[in-house]
Image (cartoon, grey):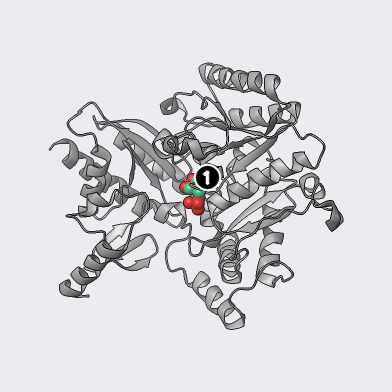
Amino acid sequence: MNQDQQQQWLAKDRQYIWHPFTQMKDYATRDHILMERAEGTFLYDADGNRYYDTISSWWVNPHGHSHPRIRSAINEQLQAFDHVQFSGFTHVPAIRLAERLVQMAPDGLNKVFYSDNGSTAVEVALKMSFQYWQQSGLTSKTKFVFLENSYHGDTLGAVSVGGVDLYHALYKPLLFHALKLPAPQVAQQQLNDVTSLTAEQQQAVKTSLDVAEQLFAERHAEIAGIIIEPMIQAAGGMNIYPAAYLSGLRALCDRYNIHLIADEVAVGFARTGKMFACEHADISPDILCLSKALTGGVLPLSVTMCGDQIYDAFYDDYETYKTFFHGHGYTANAIACAAANASLDIFAEQHTVGHVATLAQELSTQLESLKELAHISNVRQLGLIAAFDLQTSNHARPRIGFETYLQGLKHGIILRPLGNVLYYWLPLCVTADDIRDIVRRTKIVLESVFNN
Ligand SMILES: Cc1ncc(COP(=O)(O)O)c(C=O)c1O
């Protein structure tokens, strides 16, 4: 595309579009990147510049862009049919996918409820849990517990259980009341292994679980469920916590008859080195939310999975009005389900989870060299997710993360910040060479930002 055409499109972008999570004024004198092509781990702009997609396009893409397998699955499904309502009708792509998810997911999650994005998967989970208790005779169980710093999406139910003030505080008057617990307090830079803890870390986990237990002991009669992001609080700053916290919560939920809702919308599908992050703690949640990487990062789709006990509480004669009255126009979109089936084929055939373990080692080695830089701290990693904090002491540069992002673009790498946290959420198809090059470029970017 020539320069004139690009400028015309970008002018129309400015005229017509309101981008998500974006202060549009930041782009008054700066353009969004006009994308033209995406392949594997790379994005290409209209000038042909190439960028490492180090955040898997907002955490959705596992196998790289434009994967031929997913592309042909979509084409094939389109030849058959596009989309049908999912009440009174069903189709093979959705049935196959549900069967495979049940087989893969932690034990006991036997039923799949479809929706179309991560936030709605969370809404479904909350409503499902709430209605379960209403229909099981424990009608006082109406409250949800969430962790400080957690993020579960942008719809109002999900915001009600969100703990990041920057995104959530303003909307408080619109939200239902939920109970907040402190996030697990474990110094992350020493958390080399999420399953093998020092005595100090064990004590920190115990202290966090004691606070949870106190709340559950006092208020379990009111509490329907607790929602958590297993192993990593992602949007809240990429905070990794020990598996023992998760297994401890599982035990407390069992003791106090509270649903454990695992929101794996972000961390599911091998990002953390296990297919599902709950596997680090060897636990099964009562309800599991999945989305993002489910379709190989190509089309919107999500699922909320639960066990028979929850499902059975809704299963009755129509006149009992126990139906789960929830659904969306695009529920179980057949093309998205076909893409998801192709994505699961790739996981199986390419042994992606094993590949992630090997690459995580390489990432860990490369991160050692980042730790030498003066202006960063708290380097942390789980699987192919890694993060570090940028030094914030210079008050004249409160948006050092954004500065780094802009500088990264000049060096062919997307370093999208969360405030002053920089992170990698690498596509699972990266190579060891890619990882070395990504870290090398990151160092160049950081040096140029901090030496300015
Ligand atoms: C843990 C978690 N849950 C839910 C969501 C919401 O997903 P979506 O953006 O698809 O609505 C996100 C989004 O980042 C997330 O990280």
Question: Is the residue 337 above or below the residue 416 in the image?
Answer: below
Q: Residues within 10 Å of mark 1 (few under 14, many from 20)?
A: some
Quadrant showing the N terminus: bottom left
Question: Is the residue 256 above or below the residue 348 in the image?
Answer: above
Element type where label 1 sits in the image: helix
At 64% across and 46% down in the image, what residue appears? Answer: 125
The kind of residue on which mark 1 rests is Leu
View extreme (bottom): residue: 79
> Quarter of the image holding residue 170?
top left
At 85% across and 55% down in the image, what residue appears? Answer: 319
Instruction: Say which residue label 1 marks.
Output: 156
Question: Is the residue 244 above or below the residue 71 in the image?
Answer: above
Judge: label 1 CB < 8 Å from ligand 1. no
At 59% across and 19% down in the image, what residue appears? Answer: 211
> Quarter of the image holding residue 40?
bottom left
| Residue 172 image point, x, y percent | 48, 35
| Residue 354 image point, x, y percent | 55, 51
Left or right of 294 in this view: 389: left
